[in-house]
Amino acid sequence: MVKVVSPGELKSLLFKVFKALNVYDEHAELIADSLVCANLRCVDSHGVSRGLDFINGIRVGEINPRPNIRVIREDSASVLIDGDRGIGIPVAYEVTRRVIEKAKRLGVGVGAAKNLWNVGALAYYVMKIANEGLVGIALANARARISIPGVKSAIVGTNPIAVGIPTASEPIILDMALSTAAFGKIVLAARKGEKIPEGWALNKEGKPTTDPKEALEGFLLPVGGYKGFGLAVVVDILCSIFIGAPYSLVISGKGPYTQGGFLIMAMSPNMFRSYDEFVKDMDNYVSTLKSLPKDPGVEILMPGEPEARCYKERLSKGIPLDDEIWGQLVKISKELGINV
């Protein structure tokens, strides 16, 4: 069973919950917006489900609800921010805002953040960059959960990558974890009592499993075998040693809201050509790919296109939440004195 909630009402409820947990108003607004955006895009593992993790992190004292977000160092093209162990969404948003300003002035801006908890869906940040007519690339590392068959230990995190590229209409948005499936999807399957597909995970002995509970005690598999594993290692280095944050194996914290570091870049097409020419060629590129010969009923979709369609549908029809997640949110709201 599911409960269908309007996006506006869900965002309002989440805002009230985080505000009641002593989160700054402006931070609560950003957190609610990011979570609802993920649900609207059918990325439910990073929506309300992730919000429940944040709530638990605040309650057990691991997440700082009122962080002093501060700039550690900054120059004309780069910025490094300390998140003071707050929820990563407001921290990553501040970095994103600054790299957009730098890219508009200089053509490129690079930013990073450390000492923060989970930043949510990376698409949220590269979408903001693409909507400003810039190309965005975002990386993050997390506590080690990926391993390879036969190894009885996690090695690296799911360490997602996101890219946003503007077009004349919907931007191209790639957002993917470097595990075959995101950890959040394993958590959702466990909550629902559903099996997971083969090739998603290993048990704690390094053997394949379709049981999400075994997977949560074990390890995730990398996308694309050794190639995905290699990418996960590279992202781990760039989001940790490169910026002075912890790498996957030494990230502290017990909850699924862990994060090591966050790295983001914004680039202006104007560094190399006029923006109008860039957009024209992008539209030609997309239309050329979509017009390639194919079987009847087959459609070539650009990265982010399924999520954009889901966004439009759920924006009008509402966001479906399974009974368990909705029930937890209602229970927490009532405990905080919030009427649902």
Image (cartoon, grey):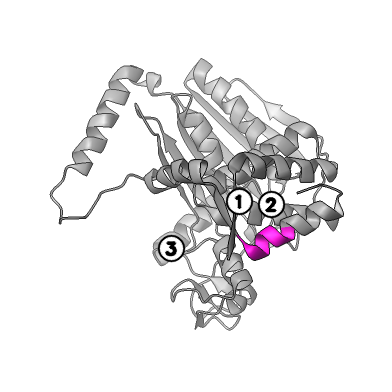
- Report if residue 326 lies within the magenta region: yes
Q: Are marks 1 and 2 in contact (CB under 8 Å)?
A: yes
Quadrant of the rendering where the N terminus is positioned = bottom right
Residue 214: horizontal and vertical position, in percent?
Answer: 60, 79
> Does 207 appear above or below 108?
below
- Report if residue 267 lies within the magenta region: no
Mark 3 closeness class: few <14, some 14–19, many ≥20 residues within 10 Å: many
Mark 2 closeness class: few <14, some 14–19, many ≥20 residues within 10 Å: many
For residue 324, which quarter of the picture? bottom right
Tell me, for residue 223, which label it has, or none: 3
- In this orientation, does residue 156 appear? no
Q: Secondary structure at mark 1?
A: loop
Q: Which residue is mark 1?
A: 47
For residue 78, which quarter of the picture? top right
Which residue is the extreme one toward the left? Answer: 293
Residue 79: horizontal and vertical position, in percent?
Answer: 64, 29
Q: The disc labelled 1 sits on which kind of residue?
A: Gly
Q: Are marks 1 and 3 in contact (CB under 8 Å)?
A: no
Q: The disc labelled 3 sits on which kind of residue?
A: Val
Real-space CA distance between mark 3 and mark 2, rounded to the nearest whole angstrom:
26 Å
Residue 151: horizontal and vertical position, in percent?
Answer: 54, 78
Residues in magenta, as a range? 322-328
Q: Which residue is mark 2?
A: 51
Real-space CA distance between mark 1 and mark 3, rounded to the nearest whole angstrom:
22 Å
Please name whichever residue, 290 or 116, is drawn nearer the observer in this view of the structure: 290
Of pointers 1 and 3, the one earlier in the residue sequence? 1
- In this orientation, does residue 48 appear? yes
